[in-house]
């Protein structure tokens, strides 16, 4: 397989749209799978995604749209999955085409529910994708800032660093800088955790805690993240690198962060259900909280922030009480 070959985007949301913009930056053709045929027709008519990042214009002559996941897989070499993690299985259930010989890139910042597997492990376990054909892309890179071409940084992780480098070059441009590493599992778990911590940051903001406490919260969050990563995937890593700490900070502080926005509503007194309805977009951290909590029942890592967010979201314990307990435990 010659990488990256013909690239396919799987998903139609804001992050999928931002990735398409990056991939097409060198005037390359792409394949793009969107589930809804009406969205595809509107996209072709208007020259932009009708529902997300509508300011980003595309040359639709360079896009081969598909509403069939089997057809897009057959005609592509590299598959970039950018769907919300709760919906991944429903898309893959329609798949009848083998993907084990494709280069799979997950841009999904969540865990597959029920199985409680990170996406790379899910593809390896259920679709026989070899580890060397599995990559993850992550980093402090909000879709909205990609749309504005503001300087952003991405890390591509793959056990085969040559493949990671070839794919990274396809994304690199004047507003995207890339780096590579091998820590696929660590980066995926970190991407899930930072969404949980962003919800915590939002809850504290909704409760009117200030910047001083937010700084202490983030300091404790990165320590908690390191403890968990060292338990589930113990390798030599620097959690102060941008793909870990940087992504945590931008997701917890940025106004573009849907997980922070979700947490803020909960902190202000919204029920979880009403906050989800108001959001109209998936807050991955809601699902990630439950998955991490269940995973940690096997590892028994000290994770007071995850526990607090879980108690608020799933046990309906008062945010004010849970955060007060956190303030007493922090230094």
Image (cartoon, rainbow, N blue to C red):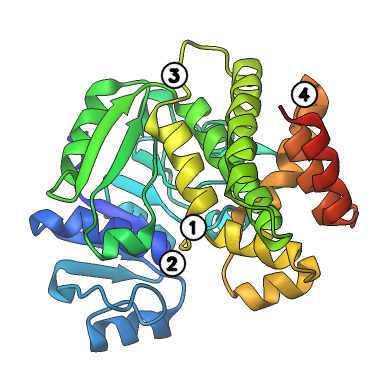
Evaluate whether residue 320 shows in this view: yes
Mark carried by residue 83: 1
Q: Residues within 10 Å of mark 3 (few under 14, many from 20)?
A: few
Q: Earlier in the sequence, mark 4 or mark 2?
A: 2
Disc ID at residue 25: none
- The numbered mark, 3 or 2, whose residue comes first in the sequence reads 2
SS under mark 1: loop
Distance of label 4 from label 2 (alpha carbons): 35 Å
- Quadrant location of residue 135? top left
Q: Earlier in the sequence, mark 4 or mark 3?
A: 3
Q: CA distance from mark 1 to mark 3?
A: 28 Å
Real-space Cα separation, disc 4 to disc 1, in angstroms:
31 Å
Badge 1 crowding class, 10 Å Cα cut-off, few under 14, some 14 to 19, many 20 or more, is many
* Residue placed under numbered mark 3 in the picture: 238
Residue marked by disc 4: 302
**Left or right of residue 155, residue 162 in this image:** left
Whether the residues at callouts 1 and 2 have beta carbons within 8 Å, the answer is: yes
Query: Gap between marks 1 and 2, in whole Å?
Result: 7 Å
x and y percentages locating residue 177 in the rendered image: 21, 40
Q: Classify mark 4: helix, strand or loop.
A: loop
| Residue plotted at (48% across, 62% down) | 255
Could you say whether the residue bearing mark 2 is in a helix, strand or loop? loop
Helix, strand or loop for disc 3: loop
Instruction: Please name the residue shown 51% across and 41% down the image.
Output: 248
Distance from Cα at disc 4 to Cα at disc 3: 20 Å
Asked if the residue under mark 2 is in contact with the one under mark 3, i.e. CB atoms within 8 Å, the reply is: no
Quadrant housing residue 11: bottom left
Q: Earlier in the sequence, mark 4 or mark 1?
A: 1
Question: Mark 2 packing: few (<14 Cα in 10 Å), some, or many (20+)?
Answer: some
Residue at image mark 2: 13
Q: Is residue 67 above or below residue 136?
A: below
Residue at 63 percent across and 56 percent down: it is: 86
């Amino acid at each position: 397989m010659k990488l990256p070959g013909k690239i396919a985007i799987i998903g139609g949301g804001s992050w999928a749209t931002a990735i398409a913009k990056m991939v097409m930056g060198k005037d390359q053709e792409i394949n793009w799978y969107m589930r809804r045929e009406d969205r595809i027709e509107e996209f072709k008519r208007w020259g932009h995604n009708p529902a997300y990042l509508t300011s980003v214009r595309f040359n639709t002559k360079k896009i081969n749209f598909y509403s069939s996941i089997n057809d897009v897989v057959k005609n592509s070499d590299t598959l970039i999955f950018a769907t919300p993690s709760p919906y991944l299985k429903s898309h893959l259930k329609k798949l009848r085409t083998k993907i084990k010989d494709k280069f799979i890139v997950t841009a999904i910042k969540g865990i597959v529910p029920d199985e409680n597997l990170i996406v790379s492990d899910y593809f390896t376990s259920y679709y026989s994708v070899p580890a060397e054909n599995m990559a993850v892309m992550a980093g402090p890179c909000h879709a909205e800032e990609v749309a504005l071409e503001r300087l952003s940084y991405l890390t591509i992780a793959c056990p085969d660093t040559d493949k990671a480098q070839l794919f990274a070059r396809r994304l690199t441009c004047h507003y995207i800088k890339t780096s590579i590493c091998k820590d696929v599992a660590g980066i995926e778990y970190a991407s899930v955790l930072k969404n949980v911590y962003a919800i915590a940051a939002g809850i504290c903001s909704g409760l009117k805690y200030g910047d001083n406490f937010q700084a202490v919260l983030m300091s404790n969050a990165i320590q908690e993240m390191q403890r968990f990563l060292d338990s589930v995937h113990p390798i030599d890593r620097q959690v102060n690198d941008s793909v870990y700490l940087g992504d945590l900070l931008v997701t917890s502080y940025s106004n573009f962060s849907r997980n922070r926005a979700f947490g803020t509503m909960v902190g202000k007194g919204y029920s979880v259900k009403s906050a989800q309805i108001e959001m109209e977009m998936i807050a991955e951290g809601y699902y990630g909280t439950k998955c991490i909590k269940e995973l940690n029942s096997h590892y028994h890592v000290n994770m007071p922030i995850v526990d607090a967010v879980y108690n608020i979201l799933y046990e309906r314990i008062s945010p004010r009480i849970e955060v007060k307990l956190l303030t007493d435990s922090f230094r």
